[in-house]
Amino acid sequence: MSENKQQEANQKLAVIRHSVSHIMAQAVVKLYPGTRTAIGPSIENGFYYDFLLPQPITNEDLGIIEAEMKKIIDSRQDFTKIAIDRDEALGHFADEQFKSELIYELPENEEISIYQNRNADGVVQWFDLCRGPHVANTREINSAAFKLQSIAGAYWRGDENRPMLTRIYGTAWETPKDLKAHLAFLEEIEKRDHRRVGKEMDLYSIHDEAGAGLIYWHPNGGRIRVAIEDFWRQLHYNNGYEILFTPHIGKSWLWETSGHLGFYKDNMYSPMDIDNQEYFIKPMNCPFHILIYNNSGHSYRDLPLRWAELGTVYRYERSGVLHGLLRVRGFTQDDAHIICTPEQMESEIREVLRFSLSLWKVFGFSDIKAYLATKPADSVGEQSRWDAALVSLRNAIDAEGLPYETDEGGGAFYGPKIDLKIKDALGREWQMTTIQFDFNEPERFDMTFIDSDGQRKRPFMIHRALLGSLERFFGVLIEHFGGAFPVWLAPEQIAVIPVSETFNSYAQKVASALKTDAAGIGKLRVTAELGDERMNAKIRNCQTRKIPYMLVVGQREADEGTVSIRLRDGRQLPAMKTEDFVLYALERITSRSLEL
């Protein structure tokens, strides 16, 4: 579908969803007299409406509301737009506190309109304050192509000091077929939800009683994290980086100098008093890296410096936005800072972008789009530096052949940036890699180098995170694979399953052989399933644990020194000698293959 046709289709759906939102409000007001209405926009894949209800409702009530909505749709009501003045609007909504507030805030010269729903006899059934647009008549909506989905609480205007409203979410489509496909998609999302899979596979936990938004990595999750970190470190060494380790706290002057206390304090934790001085737990790693740079003098011959750190930082997030691994208060950034001369800037940006794309490919992500964020209204740094940085960023994107959009004014106040967004197995887009120029901190910390002309000059500084944070990346990775990780990442790689207890000793022998260090490469992660459950029950259990390889052993295997190989997706591989299977598995692990 062409871009223009896609935009037209999206606009048509948005109109349908906004119209269904109004129909839902009409139904709710009829079913629950005394209801006060707030706002009801269309959103991606659906709509919602906020209400102040006279009584609580639950998800069980959604079917009743749906039935009333279908009656309204089937009655073929017209949506009619009427322009009115401010006094008329306030009169229409005298009993609606939220609508009245919105009306008072509208500019004097802005048109105010309402949409009336009229039945076939022209009698007004309901009306709402709205700019539109809407469908002309409810017959344009397929009554079998919408569904109410959930109920949530939402503060009016997002302000926790304002009334808590009831928000009803729904989805609407052109056809029942489209609705069915979307609901199947949502079911798949629910199956892959990292919170659900994380519990099933015993990967991590969160303990609000000990501190909300903080992640506890369990042994299984720890196995995966170590594999990721080991790969990350080796890849960085191979690409000319050095690894740093820095403290978790710093004196207040550090954060004053960096500007964090001026621009970021609301997201920082309260200071600690140590020796009568204020210390803050770090929300960023960059000031520490700058201190290391300023610890000694530098020549142009030393540059570029590529310094990376898996640095754990802490940022305050409101409890309402915390979400499993995806939005947390403590996380480990795969952080790096590149300090270079102006002449090195463009080649370094290209190298970072190439590095990032190669990294994502290993993890199975190839559908990637760049977003180029330009100078905002309030910014620091010379215009010439902004211009040069933007040219370098754009050239790097073009060199890699990446599709991109320009995010006008979306850069930080201290420099432009590239954001890379990846699409997962379900086609959802996630913002991950950031490549960010910084014209601010080199000035604030007086970073310098001696150039080839003997003059002291200011280096360029590039902030760069490829995976973003290990916690959020782990959440995305879980949902991308649905917990069925490639064998090199799987916490349990192999299960040896005897067909009966008679063959437990052979199963143990095979497991021991697999665990033995092979050619200095490392041990396979193997369990021998020796419990008293039946073989089929053990296989089902291992499939739930998403173990890549299940080696079933019985009399024939014991006699021939082989293993029968069952994959977690139910496929079978030909039987192999144990030593041949070791080589087979290790090849897939060392190559980080996405295939079993």
Image (cartoon, rainbow, N blue to C red):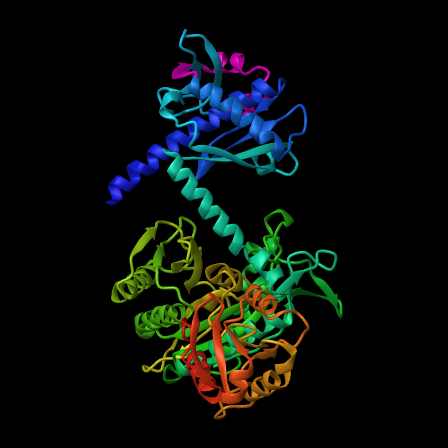
Residue 332 drawn at (x, y percent): 56, 67
Q: Quadrant of residue 221?
A: bottom right
Residue 467 drawn at (x, y percent): 47, 66
Viewport quadrant of the C terminus: bottom left
Looking at the image, residue 531 lies above or below residue 284:
below
Q: Residue at x 43, y 30 (%)?
A: 144
Q: Residue at x 48, y 51 (%)?
A: 188
Residue 492 drawn at (x, y percent): 56, 74
Most foreground residue, 197 or 213:
197
Q: Is residue 282 visible?
A: no
Most foreground residue, 392 or 222:
222
Looking at the image, residue 422 lies above or below residue 118:
below
The residue range painted magenta reads 75-103
Residue 7 drawn at (x, y percent): 30, 40
Viewport quadrant of the N terminus: top left
Q: Residue at x 40, y 51 (%)?
A: 410
How many badges with numbers are in the image?
0
Q: Quadrant of residue 108?
A: top left
Q: Is residue 582 visible?
A: yes
* Residue 428 forms part of the magenta stretch: no
Looking at the image, residue 235 lies above or below residue 21:
below
> Is residue 474 toward the left or the right of residue 107 in the image?
right
